[in-house]
Image: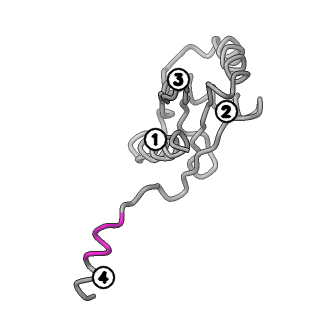
Amino acid sequence: MDRNDSAHSRKRIHTGVEGFQCKRVRTEAELKEWITVYIDGYQKPKEYQAEFFERFRELMQHADQYQLYLGLYHNRPAVAGSLFFYDGTAGLYCITTARHMRRKGLATAYLKEVITEAKK
């Protein structure tokens, strides 16, 4: 490897995790997966699942301001969070990782992808 190749490889930044993808929640089935991660990650009582579902389903009706994103690791729900837009500013809220999916860099990969979406 010559000097130029070495300098070029140092500039590369690993931006993701193998097997990880992030998608915007658009259906009730995806919302149920999102709620499952939310409840597990924040260690909320499972009996609140229906209440959370209704609350976040209502928020999804304001898609121009409030968007939910679900991170999947090898097609399994792993990270949940939301992106809120107001007056030209974006905020990230309610970000959590399912307890059995922690310590894999998934939240970092999630944040990179959601921030990229927010910039668009």
Q: Residues within 10 Å of mark 4 (few under 14, many from 20)?
A: few
Q: Which residue is mark 3?
A: 87
Going from N to C along the chain, the mark reached first, 1 or 2, is 2
Residue sitting nearer the eye, 7 or 98: 7
Going from N to C along the chain, the mark reached first, 4 or 3, is 4
Quadrant including the C terminus: top right
Going from N to C along the chain, the mark reached first, 1 or 3, is 3
Location of residue 69 (image quadrant): top right
Going from N to C along the chain, the mark reached first, 4 or 2, is 4
Q: Amino acid at mark 3?
A: Asp
Helix, strand or loop for disc 2? helix
Q: Which residue is mark 4?
A: 5
- Count of labels shown? 4
- In the rendered structure, are the residues bearing label 1 and label 3 in contact, judged by CB atoms less than 8 Å apart? no
Residue sitting nearer the eye, 50 or 28: 28
As measured in the structure, the alpha-carbon distance from the residue carrying label 4 to the one carrying label 2 is: 43 Å
| In the displayed structure image, the side of residue 3 where residue 70 appears, left or right | right
Residue 111 has which mark? Answer: 1
Q: Please say whether residue 9 is one of the residues in the magenta stretch.
A: yes
Q: Amino acid at mark 2?
A: Glu
Residue 33 has which mark? Answer: 2
Nearer the observer: mark 1 or 2; the answer is 1
Numbered range of the magenta stretch: 7-12
Helix, strand or loop for disc 1? helix
